[in-house]
Amino acid sequence: MIVLAIESSCDETSVSISKDGKTVLSNVVYSQIELHQSFGGVVPEIASREHIKRITVIFEKAFVEAGVAKEDIDLVAVTKGPGLIGSLLVGINAAKAFAFAYDVPIVGVHHLAGHIYANQIEEEMEFPLVALVVSGGHTELILMKDHYAFEKLGETHDDAVGEAYDKVARVLGLGYPGGPIIDKLAKEGTPEYPMPHIRTKGVYDFSYSGLKSHVINFLNRKKMKNESVDEKNMAASFQEAAIRHLITQSENAVRDYDAKMFIVAGGVAANSHLRDEVAKKFPHVKVSVPPFKYCTDNAAMMGIAAYYQYKKNKTADAMDLNGYSRLKLA
């Protein structure tokens, strides 16, 4: 089965063609990061307009790189949410137009399912598995006992870990996106500044609002006293606390559910400290972290997820993840 997938949930426009839920034939990604950097975050109106400008060109490039004809497509997949409404609609309308023109079925794929299935591209999933989904908008632990069977074990009570990175980077005056900048600085510093121990009601839940506020308040107090703060050491201190929280909660889930595999998914999966800690802390289970090119938003992961979604239920166009909202495409 050859799947055409479209991803446009935020500020990446991407089209991919994959085969049989494993082989990526093409994966074209256009990133808008440079356009949004001066604003300190993604501007929805700019993002949606840029998707409109780029989508057709990226479509054609994906087919050229894959070496397949449009008539060869068996299934169309598109990110249905969550994401920026205007951006999502660009991809959804493009997908519906193609599916209608070539009379092929279309499925709407949940964005987080795509991130999880990025791991399937180079590592065969083994069940039961626990997935840590970490990005700018999400921090969740998901249990999977089979393909396309999701059970949410825990989530953040407030800020997502990627959001906390961006906000800490902003108050330090480091720029956007904050995650890669803090990660790079942390390598040159030492975690000498005290950070609070994060506590949550649930053993699989997360919370980053308190850690973020602690850093902001600490910096404000130093500024009022006209005292300097070493940015590298602050980055190292914040990152050590942030990643430790992810690892601790993940260890709880892997242990309690006797998981055979632990995977990390989402943009924050590119964080070097997280990757190092995952490699050290889970020696008794199979571990999978996607290659860097599949950590950030891309259509390849959506196409892989769509294959397993369609294979499991050919009439379904939405994934059911403990009450996540559905978006009908028909």
Image (cartoon, rainbow, N blue to C red):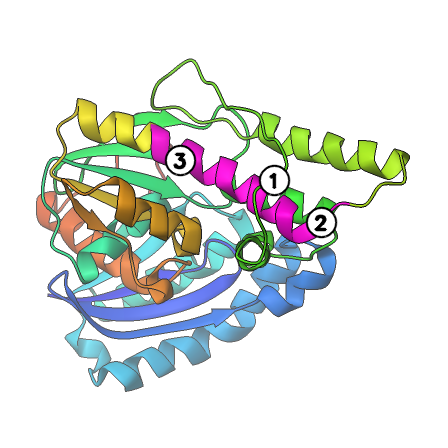
- Mark closest to the chain's N terminus, 1 or 2: 1
Quadrant location, the N terminus = bottom left
Q: CA distance from mark 1 to mark 2?
A: 10 Å
Asked whether the beta carbons under mark 1 and mark 2 sit within 8 Å of each other, the answer is yes
Circle nearer the viewer, 3 or 1: 1
Name the side, left or right, on which 140 lies relative to 76: right
Circle 2: residue type = Asp
Q: Was residue 240 drawn as part of the magenta stretch in this picture?
A: yes
Identify which residue is drawn at 31% across, 32% down.
250
Identify which residue is drawn at 28% across, 46% down.
280
Identify which residue is drawn at 67% across, 29% down.
213
Q: Which residue is mark 3?
A: 246
The residues colored magenta run: 229-248
Looking at the rendered structure, the secondary structure element under dot 1 is loop
Q: Is residue 56 visible?
A: yes
Circle nearer the viewer, 3 or 2: 2
Of the numbered discs in the image, which one, if any, rests on residue 192? 1
Q: Is residue 205 above or below residue 330?
A: above
Residue 193 lies in what quarter of the image? top right
Circle 3: residue type = Leu
Q: Is residue 44 above or below residue 254?
A: below
- Mark closest to the chain's N terminus, 3 or 1: 1
